[in-house]
Amino acid sequence: MREGKILLEVKDLKKYFSTPKGMLHAVDGISFSIKEGETLGIVGESGCGKSTTGRVILRLLEATEGEIFFDGKDIRALSKHEMRNMRKEMQIIFQDPFSSLDPRKTVSEIIAEPLKINKMIRNKEERLNRVLELMEIVGLAERLINAYPHELDGGRRQRIGIARALASNPKFIVCDEPVSALDVSIQAQILNLMDELQEKLGLTYIFITHDLSVVNHFADNIAVMYLGKLVEKAPTEELFESPLHPYTQALLSAIPVPNLRNKKERILLRGEIGSPVNPEPICRFANRCPMAKEICRSCEAELREIKPGHFVACHLVEMSEQQKMEVR
Amino acid sequence: MGEKKARRMKTPKVSKNCKPLTAEELREISDKYAVYIKDLHVAFDTQDGCVKAVNGVNMQIEKGKTLGLVGETGAGKTTTGLAMLNLIQSPPGQITAGQIVVNGQDVLHASLKELENFRGKDVSMIFQDPMTSLNPVLTVGDQIAEVISYHENCTAKEAEEKAKEILELVGIPGFRDKDYPHQFSGGMKQRVVIAIALACSPSVLIADEPTTALDVTIQAQVLEMMRELKQKLNTAMIMITHDLGIVAETCDEVSVIYAGRIVEHGTLVDIFEHTRHPYTEGLFNSLPDVTNRTAKLKPIRGLMPDPSNLPEGCAFCPRCNYAMEICKTKKPQKIYDSDTHYVECHLYSCGRQIGDGGEMDA
């Protein structure tokens, strides 16, 4: 891993939605940073706030509290106009390639739109050349240039989404479950493409997914979210080899392995993810945690650095570390 | 009323290529298998021509066993499942040839009345998307009770009680039977769909991607529950999925389907450790390897062929790394690797193999 400078830093980010039942804590005080050219995987179940996090970072949703620094600039302080300029640098690939493309625009119109909006290339011919170049980069055949999205399959549509995100030469892309709507064989094609693009263009990714086996392949660091909180953050290898949070352990064990040998013991979680509306100030995983103790139900666990680079928010991990110290 | 009765006695239209089975044949088959499909063809007539969705599928499942049907979107997995209940919408769809026997019933030559009694009681299907397969204006209790009161001779009160019991069985508190689908989370809705399918203890269960819409932790719960219920009720099951991980955990046998044909079939060990077909190999290589994170993914190149315009020879030929001249022109025949394992691929009739003559790493 190379020592790059920090491209994105997020401090104590919060996003609350007001609902008839009370405040919905979608993202509740998360902090992380990403170095240039690296990938951070954000993993969690539906409803844990991972997509909201991605959108808040791009200011597609306004944060309730917290700071976001991109390339050293506090982007929450930018005006609408400045933010629009900034978006050339930060782009997003959406989850569903079926609903994120305008059905009434052709492939070339979709890909050219960011170029037009940002007034990057005013000459029509040059714009067309750029579109063709982008199509080649993402592996779309030239003959599809006047096709409409409905004529194409999911994999090709996702390639359009990627080409559109790349159009303005961004440094940073939020990938919001870019492969979860695709078949495995197509999924692998898209993942390889994104990997190549990162190498070639030096992109920085936030890769949002619920599938741990996908980020394993892709991310340098992984952050696991549960009900709006970061529960564990570590370099990918470290996280897969020694997950410390009980939720991460359960997530890892829940992946069905396409292998008949070395079956592992499965940790079955009881119940489902709780409600993020007005959460109590206790460990949010306590109700499903197979190891929950008294302390978990009395106060919230803070994110702590257990090993260099490995952060966990769990009372129990903390305790066992302390006990180890006492023994020593 | 009389008209309705007459309609019910009618047999749905069936192609003359679907030969009815004699009583003796039927008995012989149903003694051995819960599901028996022979040479099934399904086609859809559309504006853009005839789409051949299923092209000669053969399948046998013994009682209490689980078969995994694996393939990509558009391979004909769901169509095969629907055909087993004679639920292909016609027009545009039609079963153009083949024989289907499920739980001793010749599905293609049954009257509507027989089919109505058979669907939901002897065979049920778990549909893929729990968000759309439930009725939003009925309580979940009513939806479960509907199946019970249709098939079993019982009062409304009894049906309601039984619905509660079944809800408990799938891990939902019985008092929630008065709730509507929108009040449940995705995982719980899927449990309700499973509860409806299991309400009359069917002998055969067709599970069409039952966990695709769910999170991994919930998926693990649902799969565990299905496994337990299957053992308890000794149900034969078809698990339609594209996730080989799920297959490894739930199935006894696997059929890999591509462009409406089963290209490889075998036991779990046959498929996972002695992979033969290049497509099956490609599916395995496309999966991110949890144990080796630096390995590059090896996707299958290209796309599934257009089902209204299938290649003349082997349907997989345009995407295959081992394609030979013969593959372009001639359809491959079944070749048996062992008693339980067959593959449809020209490589083996030419004495070749996938990989470098060796086995791939599972």
Image (cartoon, coloured by chain):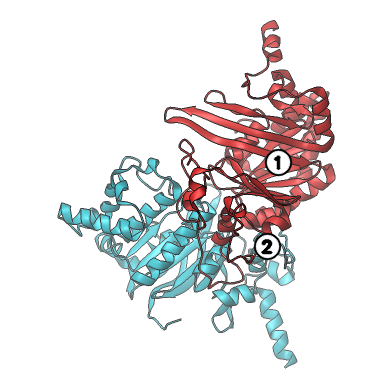
Chain colours: A cyan, B red
Chain to which the residue tagged by mark 2 belongs: A
- Identified by mark 2, the residue type is Asn
The crowd level at tag 1 (other Cα within 10 Å; few <14, some 14-19, many 20+) is: many
Of residues A228 and B289, the one drawn nearer to the viewer in this rendering: B289
Along the horizontal axis of the image, is A175 left or right of A260? left
Write down the quadrant of residue B276 in the picture.
bottom right
On the image, the x and y values in percent for residue A266 come to 73, 63
- Residue B159 sits above or below residue B282 on the image: above
Residue B194, disc: 1
**In the image, are marks 1 and 2 on the same chain?**
no
Label 1 resides on the chain identified as: B
Whether residue A278 appears in this view of the structure is no
Q: Nearer the viewer, residue B142 or B48?
A: B48
- Element at label 2: loop
Q: At x 47% / y 62%, what residue is drawn?
A: A191
Q: Counting other residues with Cα less than 10 Å from the Cα at mark 2, is it few (<14), some (14-19), or many (20 or more)?
A: some
Q: How many marks?
A: 2
Residue at the spot 40% in from the left edge and 44% down from the top edge: A152
**Left or right for B72, reference B123:** left
Q: Amino acid at mark 1?
A: Ile
Secondary structure category for the residue under label 1: helix
**Residue A259: mark:** 2
Q: Where in the figure is residue B50, as x and y percent of width and height?
A: 48, 30
Q: Residue furthest front?
A: B350
Q: CA distance from mark 1 to mark 2?
A: 27 Å
Q: Is residue A219 visible?
A: yes
Q: Is residue B1 left or right of residue B63?
A: left
Residue B362, percent from left and from top: 65, 64
